[in-house]
Image: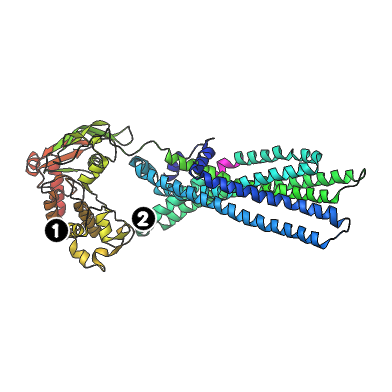
Amino acid sequence: MILAQEQSLSPTNSSGTFRRLLGYLGPYRSKLILAFVILLAATATDVVQPLLIKVFIDRYLIPRYFPRTILAELAAVYLGLVILTAVLNVVQLLLFEILALNIIQQLRIELFDKAQQIALSFFDNTPVGVVVSRITNDTQSILEMFMTVLSTFVQNITVLTGILIAMFALNTRIALDCLLLIPIILGVMTLYRKASAPIFHVARQQLALLNAKLNESLQGMAIVQAMRQESRMRHEFGQINNAYKRARFRNMQLNGILLRPLNDVIYSLTLIFVLWYFGLASFSHAVNIGVLYAFVTYLSRFFEPVNNMMQRLNFFQQAMVSAERVFQILDHEEMAPQTIGHSAAQITRGEVVFDDVSFSYDGRHDILKHISFTAHPGQTVAIVGHTGSGKSSIINLLMRFYPVERGKILIDGTDLRMISSHELRRKVGLVLQEPFLFYGDITSNIRLGNQFVSDEDVVKAARFVQAESFIRRLSGEYHAPIGERGATLSTGQRQLLSFARTMAMNPVILALDEATASVDTETENAIQNALAQMRHGRTTIAIAHRLSTVQDADLILVLHHGEIVERGTHQELLAREGLYYKMYLLQQGQSA
């Protein structure tokens, strides 16, 4: 299942990927120019060094003329150039690395922001580990490109240009012959790029699947161990790991053929040609040893940057594949439902109206069918039904997690789509069946960064939902640390904190999605008292599994296969002896 999802998200090649990445250099244009100028200076000092050796050989070594002062000055200049080249290279590499870190920081922030704005349907169909892999592993590959590949290519292309100029200054004929190397090298690079692209796509997919499987296994470790699924999980993880290993091995095979070895063959053949040329020329006239040394040195230095670029092609291709995957998330069009227009509507009374609402997650099968009801201000409307009847979908639409495409939802007479997200989230409090706590402490989890919630409000909210008694028993009380997902607390304690978090916002409307399903009977009795106070003066939409918790609701809706088949109060529904009556008898029998 996960494999099919990841393959469905696999990116497609785009010729503009590299140009789009370069677009991130725009805000740092001045620093880029400075790094490039320093790079040119480093290249110039590096290219001049063999010329000084040529001068030493031709003017002083061969004639056996060794003036101390001049040679000392020549040696000092050469040593100075070596040191200056090293310093300039360090500075320009540092500048390129700073640019790379700034760009990746910006890119990761964009990805994180985008992930928070994408429609929940994206996460319904995409494993969390896949998204994490794109934000971490794929951006790390792009970082390597900016930090090493880009600077290496710019530097080495500059070096190659300087070497070719020096070669032409030494011998025009043989320099022209060496120009034939350029299309050969470019051909090898193009061949490698085309051959490696599909391999890197597969490798990145398998790496994302590794993260997804690891994330799934760690989050469900209790179930894995309780249900003795260790061997199955190990087998599935091993299969994905082997697929990743095979992809990387194919990449290593390709690197072993098309990168350094082939380049070394081309270099050896070129060196043979140069030596043959000068050897043949020596039969007709004297060969300048300094020129020969300089030419062989330049030839070696010519292939050194070529080798560097060929080695970096591996990182470059990985970065291109990773960039396509990253841009796919950034370009994802299905966003969380947004406010239509610029309405300044406020939620004050809390009247909720569902008007002939139908909804489907996949566009083919309706989960909700023609849902219509009204929750008047201060009323409690309970929604009951068997698993899969569509109860939670009503809450999802009310919270605008998914768009309402058929029918309308009105709050205080205003279309839900026209109420700002800030107003909706501020005035509608949500408590889910499975509470989610963040890493931090008790206070930060109740406040959730809302500056208008004071420490006093936090304590009042906790006391209101009967959570203060267990909080006071914790070491640190309201500053007691909470582990990831609240692992250090019981399920009931986590649920009590989620109640306190909701009440700290003082919402106008309450949305309770089986909020007491994970709470023990003793705690439930305390929470029911708190819920009675919470509901007072507030409109409440409550999804319930235990019918005993909604007997005092003003209106009970019974859902069956996405439709409201019964509605009324507890006593009215019992008198009809329909589906609600059967559910009630079943639960009473279970209780007995």
Q: Is residue 283 magenta?
A: no
Numbered marks: total: 2
Q: Quadrant of the N terminus?
A: top left
Magenta residues span 195-200
- Amino acid type assigned to the residue bearing label 2 in the image: Gly
Image quarter of residue 443 = bottom left
Q: Is residue 454 left or right of residue 74?
A: left
Q: Is residue 198 magenta?
A: yes
Q: Quadrant of the C terminus?
A: bottom left
Helix, strand or loop at disc 1? helix
Alpha carbon separation for disc pair 1 and 2: 30 Å
Residue holding disc 1: 526
Residue 550 percent coordinates (x, y) = 13, 47
Residue 473 percent coordinates (x, y) = 22, 68
Give the main secondary structure, helix, strand or loop, of the magenta stretch: helix
Q: Are marks 1 and 2 in contact (CB under 8 Å)?
A: no
**Can you name the residue that lies furthest to the front here?**
69
Q: Is residue 115 left or right of residue 164?
A: left
Q: Is residue 186 left or right of residue 513?
A: right
Q: Which mark is residue 220?
A: 2
Q: Is residue 490 visible?
A: no
- Amino acid type assigned to the residue bearing label 1 in the image: Ala
Residue at horizontal 26%, vertical 39%?
400
Tell me which label, 1 or 2, sits earlier in the chain.
2
Q: Is residue 229 left or right of residue 537?
A: right
The answer to which of 240 and 470 lies nearer the viewer is 470
Residue 437 percent coordinates (x, y) = 29, 56
Helix, strand or loop at disc 2? loop
**Can you name the residue that lies furthest to the right here?**
284
The answer to which of 227 and 454 lies nearer the viewer is 454
